[in-house]
Image: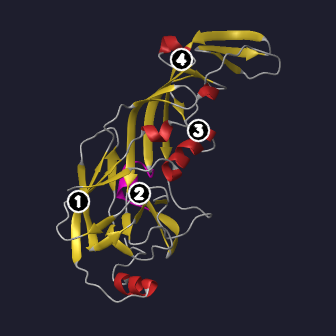
């Protein structure tokens, strides 16, 4: 993959921007590690439900570290870059060596990265890279169980994250926010950089209460009604048949009836909540290894 960000122009553009004399820089590379959470994988959401995460695989990369305090279009030139991708099991706290960050020495003050899907200025279509292909063309595959109104609701979602018509083409989608603290004067012989993801941050705003209902058959109502785990097949106010989804180790979903799990689809508010959390929610932690 050809990066839009060129290291070769770094020195001259940086000097021109600051209007100062050249200083010495050295080519360098350092190990990049990725890891999942070392925290509990159960979280109480802002809606009051408890969610247990059973799977949270993330396609991560490429990654760019920039000299300026603001990533994005202002980071025309990366000081350090890693152009590969890797699938991160964010439920595993074991550090995984993803590869090498390559570039030149000097201060870095911001970062930006993609989630396995990258856009380029040379093409209207985004490139699905290896890690995202491993996840079926997605940036995130997440599965879990929510306790809602006394009922366990299994759920899953598959979410691709890429540039849209409203974002900058050719620029990675996730960037350091102004409130994030990040600085390193990168020198030769660095021990490496570790990036840690906590999937609990992605589900705190996930409200699944709309999928657990206490309904009965009513005139002009839905054909399938759910009363907790009870599934009713209705003809107006008449219950034609009923069954307990719990006896089948299933859950009763509105308008669908007994199903193994809730599949969160792209038109739902819950899908948007997960996507927004990945794009603009709590960022992963960046830790320099000393």
Give the alpha-carbon distance from disc 2 to disc 3, as whole Å.
30 Å
Q: Which residue is mark 2?
A: 181
| Residue position marked by numbered label 4 in the rendering | 151
Return the disc, 3 or 1, that comes first in the chain's sequence. 1
In the rendered view, tell whether residue 155 sits above or below residue 175. Answer: above
Give the label, 4 or 1, closer to the camera: 1
Q: Quadrant of residue 133?
A: bottom left
Between discs 4 and 3, the one toward the N terminus: 4
**Disc 4/disc 1 C-alpha distance (Å):** 45 Å
- Check disc 2 and report its element: helix, strand or loop: loop
Residue 177 placement (x, y as % from top left): 49, 58
Position of residue 207 measured from the top left corner of the image (x, y, whole percent): 58, 32
- Is label 3 or label 1 in front? 1
Judge depth for marks 1 and 2 and give the one in front. Answer: 2
Dot 1 alpha-carbon crowd within 10 angstroms: few under 14, some 14 to 19, many 20 or more = some
Please name the residue that numbered disc 1 is placed on.
192
SS label for mark 3: helix
Whichever of callouts 4 and 2 sits on the residue coming sooner in the sequence is: 4
Q: CA distance from mark 3 to mark 1?
A: 36 Å
**Which residue is found at the position 49% from the left and 64% from the top?**
126
Q: Around disc 3, counting alpha carbons within 10 Å, would you say few (fewer than 14), some (14 to 19), or many (20 or more)?
A: some
Residue depth check, mark 4 versus mark 2: number of the one nearer the observer:
2
Q: Which residues are magenta?
A: 128-138
For the residues labelled 3 and 1, say whether their Cβ atoms are less than 8 Å apart.
Answer: no
Is residue 216 at least partly visible in the picture? yes
Residue 240 in the image: x percent, y percent?
71, 10
> As displayed, is residue 233 above or below residue 19?
above
Answer whether residue 20 is magenta in the image: no
Question: Mark 3 highlights which residue?
Answer: 270
């Amino acid at each position: 993959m050809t990066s839009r960000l060129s290291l070769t122009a770094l020195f001259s553009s940086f000097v021109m921007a600051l209007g100062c004399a050249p200083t010495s820089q050295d080519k360098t590379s350092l190990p990049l590690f990725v890891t999942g959470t070392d925290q509990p994988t159960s979280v109480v959401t802002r809606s009051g439900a408890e969610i247990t995460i059973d799977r949270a695989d993330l396609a991560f990369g490429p990654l760019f570290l920039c000299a300026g305090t603001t990533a994005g279009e202002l980071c025309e030139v990366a000081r350090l870059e890693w152009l590969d991708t890797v699938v991160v099991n964010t439920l595993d706290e074991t550090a995984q060596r993803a590869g090498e960050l390559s570039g030149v020495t000097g201060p870095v003050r911001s970062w930006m990265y993609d989630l396995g899907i990258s856009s380029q200025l040379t093409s209207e279509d985004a490139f699905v890279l290896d890690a995202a292909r491993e996840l079926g063309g997605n940036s995130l595959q997440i599965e879990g169980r929510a306790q809602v109104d006394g009922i366990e609701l299994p759920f899953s979602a598959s979410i691709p994250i890429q540039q849209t018509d409203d974002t900058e083409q050719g620029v990675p989608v996730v960037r350091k926010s102004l409130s994030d603290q990040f600085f390193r004067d990168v020198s030769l012989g660095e021990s490496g950089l570790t990036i840690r993801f906590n999937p609990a941050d992605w589900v705190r705003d996930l409200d699944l209460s709309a999928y657990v209902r206490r309904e009965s058959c009513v005139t002009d109502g839905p054909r399938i009604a759910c009363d907790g785990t009870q599934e009713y097949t209705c003809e107006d106010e008449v219950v034609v048949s009923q069954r307990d989804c719990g006896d089948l180790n299933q859950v009763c979903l509105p308008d669908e009836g007994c199903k193994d799990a809730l599949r969160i689809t792209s038109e739902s508010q819950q899908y948007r909540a997960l996507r927004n959390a990945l794009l603009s929610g709590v960022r992963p932690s960046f830790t320099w290894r000393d």
